[in-house]
Amino acid sequence: MKRFSTITIGAHSPDLHANLRVAVGHVTVSKTDIENSYLGKPNVSVRRLQRLNQLLNDIVKHGARHPDKRIDLLVLPE
């Protein structure tokens, strides 16, 4: 049986539970946008991109204000 390889990130430790701060972001996506994306016509309007940009900026500002609570990984379930 082939052995699995270990990948280390950050502090060269395979256990990141004590060091990794994960945030789950949410931007409302309309039913129409989901359907159009599936059909190959995604909504790339300035308004939609500005909402995503605002979320990313808020995360960066949070990290600047609270360096001890800086976010390492952002998950966008949409």
Image (cartoon, rainbow, N blue to C red):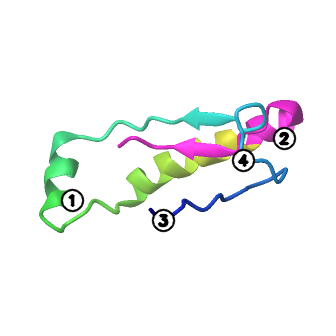
Which amino acid does the dot numbered 4 rest on? Answer: Pro
Tell me the element at label 2: helix
In this view, 5 is above or below 19: below
Question: Residue 2 got which mark?
Answer: 3
Q: In the shown orientation, is residue 9 left or right of residue 41?
A: right
Q: CA distance from mark 2 to mark 4?
A: 27 Å
Tell me if label 3 and label 4 are in contact, CB under 8 Å.
no
Q: Position of residue 55 (x, y in %)?
A: 56, 42
Tell me the element at label 4: loop
Which amino acid does the dot numbered 2 rest on? Answer: Ala
Residue occupying the far bottom of the picture: 40
Quadrant holding the C terminus: top left
Q: CA distance from mark 3 to mark 4?
A: 19 Å
Mark 2: few, some, or many residues within 10 Å (few <14, many ≥20)?
few
The residue identified by callout 1 is 37
Q: In the shown orientation, is residue 64 left or right of residue 75?
A: right
Q: In the shown orientation, is residue 76 left or right of residue 11?
A: left
Magenta includes 77? Answer: yes
Tell me the element at label 1: helix
Q: In the shown orientation, is residue 31 left or right of residue 11?
A: left
Q: Which residues are magenta?
A: 61-78
In front of the other: label 1 or label 3? 3
